Amino acid sequence: IARKEILKARITKTISSVRPLTMFLPVVFNFNNGELMVTPQGAKNSGDFLSLIGTDGFLELEPGENVIEANTLVSVYPWHLLKISSY
């Protein structure tokens, strides 16, 4: 059974979509003052697998007209579990 991890993170830049389909945007993780931040990476279309190289996970945009403002808390799905050290 696969286990899905959903993390909450702040998005670093505003994104928007007017597509009639659900979009899955690859993201890169970083930390700012101990808070998880995500930066969306450009993907040209659903077959653009090369855009996944160097990313840490993805976020989901529902179909329709959507705008997510920078600094908004979003749900992200990591490719792997995060290991955060306390030192």
Image (cartoon, rainbow, N blue to C red):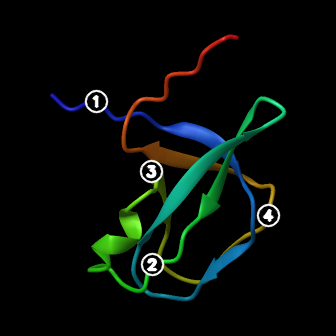
Q: Nearer the viewer, residue 18 or 78?
A: 78
Q: CA distance from mark 2 to mark 4?
A: 18 Å
The image quarter in which residue 48 lies: bottom left
3D distance between C-alphas at marks 3 and 2: 13 Å
Amino acid, disc 4 = Ala
Element marked by disc 3: strand
Residue that numbered label 3 is attached to: 57
Quick check: marks 2 and 1 in contact, CB under 8 Å? no
- Kind of residue indicated by mark 1: Arg
**The residue tagged with tag 1: helix, strand or loop?**
loop
Residue highlighted by disc 2: 43
- The kind of residue on which mark 2 rests is Ala
Earlier-in-chain disc, 2 versus 4: 2
Closer to the chain start, of discs 3 and 4, is 3
* Image marks 3 and 2: residues in contact by CB distance under 8 Å: no
* Location of mark 4 (residue): 70
Disc 1 from disc 4: Cα separation: 29 Å
Q: Position of residue 6 (x, y in %)?
A: 48, 38
The residue at the point 52 percent across, 77 percent down is 42
Residue depth check, mark 3 versus mark 1: number of the one nearer the observer:
3
Q: Which mark is residue 32?
A: none
Q: Which residue is mark 1?
A: 3
